[in-house]
Image (cartoon, helix red, strand yellow):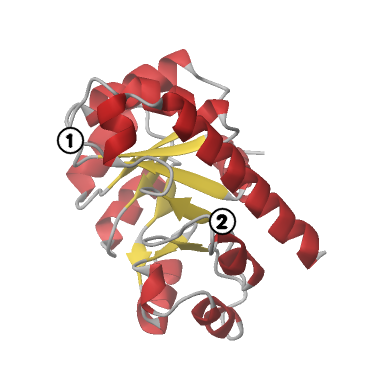
């Protein structure tokens, strides 16, 4: 089994991608550790955060085998390559750029482009996406995933944008392969106060929510 397949299975098995978006770099590593302590092991650091690439490199070295670290808000192939060389094991974009997927394929790295409409979702999949980030997910809600999965059952969908503890289970029940969660785990108040206990507890609650949703599906 390839490393890329291992990483895909990691995301599928965990069912959660945590998103870190901050306006300061000194909290990134502590935030990653707090999320991981809560049981989430696929973590995306968005490149809009200062020092994101350095944090990705540090995490990929210090927590190898413990977490899957990714880069988010990747808009072009040059940035995708820089992120992969920094240690990112998956690349997430808010929109579809086939050249970003091409770079991911070249480096055997998971590609998660963003899309919303059925045409965009199918195009992303045909371009070689491993997962398709449906963004913003709350535009149409969990029921939209049931509608998309009916004609496109083979596509791995990850709702992003507005996913919370209250609706994460609903997205999973309607066909999402995993959920991507940001502000409901790590908000500005937690970062400002360095309240890592709250971050860890929220992560644990989300893990339990996804576990229960999957259990009810079987």
Query: In the displayed structure, would residue 3 be above or below residue 130?
Result: above
Q: Where is residue 128 shown, x and y percent of the image?
A: 44, 61
The answer to whether residue 117 is seen in the rendering is yes
**Label annotation for residue 34:** none
Query: In the displayed structure, would residue 75 be above or below residue 18?
Result: below
Label 1 Cα crowd, 10 Å radius (few <14 / some 14-19 / many 20+): few
User: In front here: 98 or 90?
Assistant: 90
Dot 1 corresponds to which residue? 23
Q: Where is residue 131 shown, x and y percent of the image?
A: 48, 59
Q: Where is residue 94 shown, x and y percent of the image?
A: 28, 59
Which quadrant holds residue 215?
Answer: bottom right
Label 2 Cα crowd, 10 Å radius (few <14 / some 14-19 / many 20+): many
Dot 2 corresponds to which residue? 178
Quarter of the rendering occupied by the C terminus: bottom right
Count the labels in the image: 2
Q: Is residue 75 left or right of residue 165?
A: left
Q: Is residue 90 left or right of residue 22?
A: right
Instruction: Tell which circle, 1 or 2, labels the residue nearer the N-terminal end.
Output: 1
Quarter of the rendering occupied by the N terminus: top right
The answer to whether residue 35 is seen in the rendering is no
Residue at image point 35% right, 66% down: 135
Label 1 SS = loop
User: In front here: 127 or 199?
Assistant: 199
Residue at image point 34% right, 55% down: 101
Query: In the displayed structure, would residue 110 be above or below residue 57?
Result: below
CA–CA distance between discs 1 and 2?
26 Å
Q: Residue furthest top?
A: 62
């Amino acid at each position: 089994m390839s490393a890329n397949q291992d990483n895909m299975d990691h995301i599928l098995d965990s069912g959660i991608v945590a998103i870190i978006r901050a306006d300061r770099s000194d909290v990134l590593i502590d935030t990653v550790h707090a999320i991981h302590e809560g049981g989430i092991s696929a973590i995306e650091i968005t490149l809009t955060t200062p020092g994101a690439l350095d944090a990705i490199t540090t995490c990929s070295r210090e927590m190898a085998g413990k977490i899957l670290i990714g880069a988010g808000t990747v808009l072009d192939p040059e940035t995708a390559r820089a992120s992969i060389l920094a240690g990112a094991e998956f690349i997430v974009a808010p929109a579809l750029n086939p050249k970003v997927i091409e770079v991911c394929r070249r480096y055997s790295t998971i590609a998660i482009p963003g899309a919303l409409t059925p045409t965009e979702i199918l195009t992303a999949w045909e371009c070689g996406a491993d997962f398709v980030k449906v963004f913003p997910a709350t535009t149409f809600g969990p029921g939209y995933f049931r509608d998309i999965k009916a004609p496109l059952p083979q596509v791995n969908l990850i709702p992003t944008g507005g996913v919370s503890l209250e609706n994460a289970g609903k997205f999973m029940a309607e066909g999402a392969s995993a959920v991507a969660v940001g502000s409901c785990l790590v908000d500005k108040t937690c970062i400002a106060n360095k309240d890592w206990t709250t971050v860890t507890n929220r992560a644990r609650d989300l893990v339990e929510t996804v576990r229960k949703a999957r259990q009810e599906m079987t």
